[in-house]
Amino acid sequence: MQLIVNGETLEMEARTIQDVILHFGLEERPVVVEADGEIIAKEQWPFMEVRPMMKIELVHFVGGG
C-alpha cells in the first residue's frame, strides 16, 4: 500500500503504525508518530491501522554535537 511518510510517498507492506516503525528499524529508538495530524501514543502503535495514502510523520532523535 502507498503511504506518505515524512512527505515522501512510499510503497510498503504495513497494516499498523507498528509495522511502519519496524520497516524503518526505529523500534529501539525514541520516536514520536503523527498520523493524519494526530499524535499517536506508543501504546496504540500495534493497534492503529494504516490506510492507503495516510500521512505519517516520524520524528526520532539523533545525538550529536
Image (spheres, rainbow, N blue to C red):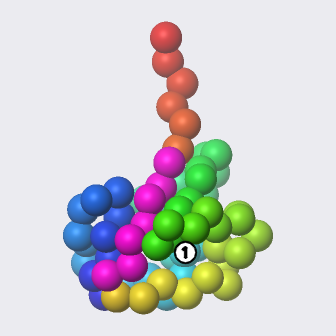
Q: In this view, does 22 lie to the left or right of 4?
A: right
Q: Is residue 23 in the magenta section?
A: no
Name the main secondary structure of what is drawn in magenta. Answer: strand
Residue 53 visible, this angle: yes
- State the count of labels: 1
Q: Is residue 26 left or right of residue 2?
A: right
| Image quarter (top left, top right, bottom left or bottom right) of the N terminus | bottom left
Q: Which residue lies furthest to the top in this view?
A: 65
Residue at (54%, 82%) from the top-left corner? 16
Task: Write down the region rendered in magenta.
Answer: 53-59
In the rendered image, residue 26, in percent from the top left (x then y), is placed at: 53, 54
Where's residue 2, x and y in %? 28, 82
Judging by the rendered image, the residue that carries numbered circle 1 is 17
Q: Quadrant of residue 27?
A: bottom right
Vertical side of 28 occupied by 54: above or below: below
Q: Where's residue 24, x and y in %?
A: 43, 59
Is residue 50 or residue 26 the one in the foreground?
A: 50
Pick out the residue farthest to the right: 43
Give the quadrant of residue 51. Answer: bottom left
User: Tag 1's secondary structure?
Assistant: helix
Q: Is residue 24 above or below residue 51?
A: above
Type of amino acid at the residue the image marks with label 1 = Ile
Residue at (35, 57) in percent of width and height:
6
Residue occupying the point 65% across, 73% down: 45
Q: Where is residue 57 in the image (x, y as percent from the top left)?
A: 44, 59
Residue at 54% from the left image edge and 24% from the top image edge: 63
Q: Vertically, is 30 above or below 12?
A: above
